Image (cartoon, helix red, strand yellow):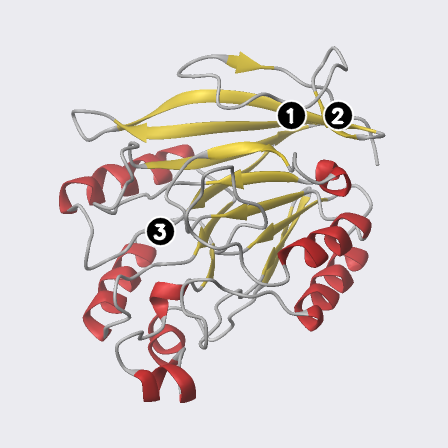
Amino acid sequence: MTRLIHLSDLHFGRDRPELLDPLIDAVNRARPDLVAISGDLTQRARQSQFRAARIFIDRIEAPVLSVPGNHDIPVHRPLTRFFRPFHNYRRRIARELAPVVRIDGMTVIGMNTVDRYRWQRGRVKSRQVRRACAEADRSPDSDLVILVAHHPFEHAPGTKKQLMRGAEKALRKLSACGVDAILSGHLHVWRTEPFLTRPFGAGILQIHAGTGLSTRHRGEPNDFACIDREGEVLRVARWVAGEDDRFTESTIRHFGRGSDGWRTMDGQGPVPSDPGPAEEHRLYRVAK
């Protein structure tokens, strides 16, 4: 079994300090092979906030792959945002903005979707997609190929934020070149299902984590995702913070993919919306 933990939107500077130790404890007790952080480590990209994020990362026992989010560039300092947007991120978190990590059974590809000119919306460029596809092509045939980006490639109906520029075109190409799943954040809501609104996206599973630590939790509990590859089955569990501030496993789903995309075990279509705490949906997965 290979285990990947997905954290997002920690927002140091607007975080809940009482959740810091419980989150670290939950992540380390899970003993993941890799922890992926999909951006917005800070609230205002200040040095003190990046220092706090760095201390947090250093307490994680597993290797960490991180990509920046729009809050990780200084929105209120336009000259710095335009000319040195990732200076503090690179200094404190990682020099590489789009890292790639290969672990047993998984190739995990980072993508930087931050747009310094359209701060909140984000953008995916053709050259970034070509690079991700090249990494996917280099991965072993047996690997699950996972992309990590801050901005989602699809929004649920009613989402007020704008979808990032280039998302639909990029999703089409990523689906064609063999990306199996996309991990993202930005919206501070939990969502895990195939890309439903575009037929070509059914071959990619989208996993949005909410916020691990932030007070800006949109009425949902703070959470993170624990993703296990068990042979030909992908198990996705949502871990949520309870009233005692401890993170415990909540919704669990098992995903698999047939010839026409990610589908349910009985072959009647994709997984429905979030089924609620402790409820399981088992799906099958066949080889690519």
Q: Is label 3 in contact with label 2 (beta carbons under 8 Å)?
A: no
Q: Read off the residue under disc 1.
A: 255
Which residue is label 2 attached to? 285
Q: Is residue 16 above or below residue 58?
A: above
Give residue 1's position: percent from left, percent from top: 61, 31
Which amino acid is tagged 2? Answer: Arg
What's the distance in space between the residues labelled 3 and 1, CA to CA? 25 Å
Q: Are marks 1 and 2 in contact (CB under 8 Å)?
A: yes
Residue at the image position 41 percent from the left and 77 percent from the top = 86
Q: Which mark is residue 9?
A: 3
3D distance between C-alphas at marks 1 and 2:
7 Å
- Identify the residue at image location x=29%, y=43%: 24
Position of 29 relative to 249 (above/below): below
Check disc 2: other Cα within 10 Å, few if <14, some if 14-19, many if 20+: many
Percent position of residue 90, x then y: 40, 76
* Nearer the observer, 247 or 169: 169
Say which residue appears at 83% left-offset and 31% top-offset: 287
**Kind of element beneath mark 3:** loop
Which sits in the foreground, 203 or 76? 76
